[in-house]
């Protein structure tokens, strides 16, 4: 997504929601990761105005907050698609052919890993291990695992998500 | 009272093969027959045999049903539950058994396993503290509370328990350090940030037997003089976190957590911290930083966490599996019993996540000292599709590849280290002749390179340079001097990195060079990848003598690079072929050959 599109989305953020999340943690700087997790659960990502707000309320410099969010894979600074595809990059999946699966998805959606399609339909991500090594190679679309994949099965699976 | 307990595996492996639908259909069937009150349905922990999931085990009959489909449930209810007769059709069958196998002791997958850590997993309801207590749970805690701290440390030392997180440091000694550290406030941290790709035993323990972890931490608390604990768990394990929260709440209600536990004057408060996705947080000082709400970057040791840990206080950090062993050791007579299993230097059992190209994938718990051959061929049932066993990767990105020649190597801390691998967290990924060892080394290094926190130069820059060289080799641009450069870089990184991530991440490269040097040389000098993985270094050809012209490959090829008439041998148009591998997966005659670039149709190598 372009930066302009993100900026537009960020205009309608309700900061009262953020306040109610922060409230129980005020003064506890060590709780910044749980705060970010809860905020992201609410908005789907960490909008810039929200980050600025957390920084002010928690007395943590924005730069440090940014440092924490970019360190951990879980935190996203950009909006994500309606459907999240997670391609398992675990060892078992790798040797059972997950690179071929990724390639096919990238081809079909015309995005690279970490990106979101322009229509916000899909975000493509990689994950270190889903823990279903017996079903390798595996992808998760939202909460549904799809196992024992071959590249030719990919299109039908994606077609099932709007 | 229930007539029978029906345990449905509710772990991630079986959930992905549909155990939720199984549970729903089973419930409907029981309701339809009006017998639902007679049976206790439990979405329980993991019996380990993910390959044949979804799994149901019926107690007290001890019957193991596998590969279940929703449509099987009616028969299961009528014939077994109501009729009392085993449904033979749904029992385990395989090339390794003569007749359908009824239970653990008759299924070869379980024959060499010994359940210590997984003793309750799949047997009890993980959300019931009563069932844990009925299996002897919290008895070790009661005993520990009457013991002197040093005596507990000594028992754990005598049992020979070594940390299951990877490095294998003796747990009792570690506890002793924290115990002796000055200061009134100390912490116990459970490292449940299982990040190794290909390892999921900690999750299974957390999901299947959460009270064992709490009990282990409480005993550790008593032994170290700590009164507060943190469980640092991956956010990617929502079910584990939910079960831990339930367990903590139950333990508090029973007076097993909180103040004055069991009237002993001992207090303990338990917290859960969710990780946010950073592999390096498995490193103990990085984990501590993360608990404090900072970037999870490691710091130099000393001071060790036993002196300066979380919030600057003395802290013991133990891995999930280590803690799950504790109640067994600290119970009456447990230490001596425990030390009977295993080898001289490695006592007890180890849980492994067996995956890759092995027939029986899943979670296995075996005595230390078992050989690789026993694990792969007896427990694992051999290689998928009867292909050739090439190597096994032990210990994930910090571990190494053990080749076929070392098949008799006993698996214990010291033998693995000598072979260049490590015990690590216990991932065992089996590889066959279609796995390229150069690509595998590249895969692990690209993982550690991405996860390198960037604090120290050898790890940040060194892994990048090594990765660049490996990328070149797999793209066909390797140079003869590359192997020496890789070797010298690897040793510099091992010697000079700040933390365990950097110190171990060259292991996959070093072991693959040590045992599979010829494959590297083939890539570099001959421009050939014999496993058919590195795309510029091979081509597919169709074996003209064996192709039956079934058109399966023609249909599946996404770029229309295969031509040929029905019942006539097909041909691949090399200019169009993207080497996506769709055809080789599809061909049932095994007649798509991996050949050197430029070979002609009748040459197979």
Image (cartoon, rainbow, N blue to C red):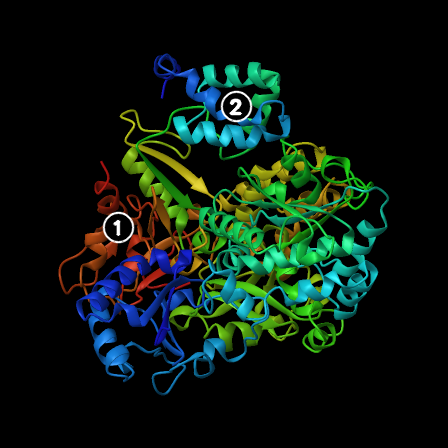
Rendering quarter of residue B426 = bottom right
Name the residue carrying label 1. A153
- Left-right relation of B89 to B96: left
Chain bearing tag 2 is A
Q: Are marks 2 and 1 in contact (CB under 8 Å)?
A: no
Q: Is residue B468 visible?
A: no
Q: What is the residue that sits farthest to the left in this orientation?
A: B566
- The tag earlier along the polypeptide, 2 or 1, is 2
CA separation, marks 2 and 1? 47 Å
- Residue B537 drawn at (x, y percent): 45, 49
Image quarter in which the C terminus of chain B is found = bottom left
Whether residue B349 is visible here, answered yes or no, is yes
Mark 1, residues whose alpha carbon is within 10 Å: few (<14), some, or many (≥20)? few
Q: Quadrant of the N terminus of chain B?
A: bottom left
How crowded is the residue under tag 2: few (<14 C-alpha within 10 Å), some, or many (20+)?
A: few
The quarter holding residue B452 reads top right
At x 39%, y 44%, the residue is A87
Q: Is residue B600 left or right of residue B331?
A: left
Chain to which the residue tagged by mark 1 belongs = A
Residue located beneath label 2 in the image: A23
Q: From this viewpoint, which residue is outermost toward the bottom?
A: B98
The answer to which quarter of the image holds residue A126 is top left
- In this view of the protein, which residue sits in the foreground, B174 or B126? B126
Residue B603 in percent (x, y) is at 37, 63
Identify which residue, B48 or A3, lies in the foreground.
B48
Query: Which element carries disc 2, helix, strand or loop?
Result: helix
* Spot occupied by residue A34 in the image (x, y as percentages of width and height): 54, 32
């Amino acid at each position: 997504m372009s930066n302009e599109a993100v900026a537009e989305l960020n205009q309608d953020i309700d900061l009262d929601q953020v306040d109610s999340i922060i409230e129980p943690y005020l003064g506890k700087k060590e709780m910044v990761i749980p705060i970010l997790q809860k905020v992201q659960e609410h908005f789907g990502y960490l909008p810039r105005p929200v980050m600025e707000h957390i920084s002010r309320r928690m007395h943590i410099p924005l730069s440090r907050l940014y440092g924490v969010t970019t360190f951990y894979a879980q935190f996203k600074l950009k909006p994500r698609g309606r459907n999240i595809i997670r391609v398992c990059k675990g060892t078992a999946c790798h040797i059972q052919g997950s690179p071929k699966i990724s390639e096919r998805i990238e081809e079909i959606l015309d995005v690279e890993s970490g990106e979101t399609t322009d229509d916000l339909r899909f975000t493509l991500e990689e994950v270190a291990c889903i823990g279903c090594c017996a079903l390798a190679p595996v992808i998760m679309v939202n909460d549904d695992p799809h196992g024992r994949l071959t590249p030719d099965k990919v299109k039908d699976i994606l077609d099932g998500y709007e | 009272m229930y007539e029978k307990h029906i345990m449905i595996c509710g772990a991630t492996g079986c959930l992905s093969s549909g155990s939720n639908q199984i549970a729903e259909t089973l419930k409907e069937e029981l309701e339809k027959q009006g017998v639902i009150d007679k049976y206790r349905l439990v979405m329980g922990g993991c019996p380990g045999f993910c390959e044949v999931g979804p799994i149901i085990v019926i107690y007290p009959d001890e019957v193991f049903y596998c590969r279940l489909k929703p449509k099987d449930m009616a028969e299961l209810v009528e014939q077994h539950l109501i009729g009392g007769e085993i449904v033979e059709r749904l029992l385990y069958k395989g090339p390794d058994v003569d007749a359908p196998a009824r239970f653990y002791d008759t299924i070869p997958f379980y024959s060499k396993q010994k359940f210590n850590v997984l003793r309750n997993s799949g047997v009890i309801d993980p959300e019931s503290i009563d069932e844990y207590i009925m299996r002897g749970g919290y008895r070790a805690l009661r005993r520990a509370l009457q013991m002197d701290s040093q005596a507990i440390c000594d028992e754990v030392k005598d049992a020979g328990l070594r940390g299951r997180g990877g490095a294998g440091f003796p747990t009792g000694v570690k506890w002793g350090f924290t115990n002796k550290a000055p200061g009134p406030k100390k912490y116990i941290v459970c490292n449940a940030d299982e990040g190794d790709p290909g390892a999921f035993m900690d999750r299974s323990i957390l999901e299947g037997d959460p009270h064992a972890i709490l009990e282990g931490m409480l005993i550790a608390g008593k032994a170290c003089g700590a009164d507060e604990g943190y469980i640092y768990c991956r956010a990617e394990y929502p079910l584990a976190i939910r079960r831990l929260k339930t367990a903590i709440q139950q333990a508090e209600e029973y007076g097993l957590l909180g103040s004055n536990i069991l009237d002993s004057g001992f207090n303990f408060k338990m917290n859960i911290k969710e990780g946010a996705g950073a592999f390096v947080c498995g490193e103990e000082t990085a984990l501590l930083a993360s608990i404090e709400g900072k970037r999870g970057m490691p710091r130099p040791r000393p001071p060790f966490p036993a002196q300066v840990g979380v919030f600057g206080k003395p802290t013991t950090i133990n891995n999930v599996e280590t803690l799950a062993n504790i109640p067994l050791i600290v119970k009456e007579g447990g230490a001596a019993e425990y030390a009977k299993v295993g080898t001289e230097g490695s006592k007890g059992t180890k849980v492994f996540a067996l995956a890759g190209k092995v027939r029986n994938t899943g979670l296995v718990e075996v005595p230390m000292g078992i050989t690789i051959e026993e694990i792969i061929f007896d427990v694992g049932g051999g290689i998928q599709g009867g292909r050739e066993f090439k190597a096994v990767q032990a210990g994930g990105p910090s571990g190494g590849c053990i080749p076929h020649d070392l098949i008799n190597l006993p698996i214990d801390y010291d033998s693995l280290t000598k072979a260049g691998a490590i015990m690590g967290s216990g991932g065992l990924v089996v590889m066959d002749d279609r796995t390229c060892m150069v690509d595998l080394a590249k895969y692990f290094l690209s993982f550690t390179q991405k996860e390198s926190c960037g604090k120290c130069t050898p790890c940040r820059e060194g892994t990048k340079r090594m990765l660049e060289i490996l990328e070149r080799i797999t793209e066909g641009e390797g140079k003869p001097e590359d192997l020496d450069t890789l070797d010298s870089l690897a040793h510099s990184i091992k010697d000079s990195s700040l933390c365990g991530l950097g110190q171990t991440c060259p292991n996959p490269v070093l072991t693959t060079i040590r045992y599979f040097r010829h494959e590297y040389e083939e890539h570099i000098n001959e421009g050939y990848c014999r496993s058919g993985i590195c795309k510029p270094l091979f081509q597919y050809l169709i074996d003209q003598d064996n192709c039956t012209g079934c058109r399966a490959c023609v249909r599946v090829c996404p770029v229309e690079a295969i031509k040929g008439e029905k019942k006539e041998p097909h041909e691949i148009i090399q200019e169009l072929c993207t080497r996506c591998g769709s055809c080789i997966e599809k061909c049932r005659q095994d007649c798509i050959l991996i050949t050197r670039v430029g070979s002609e149709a009748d040459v197979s190598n």
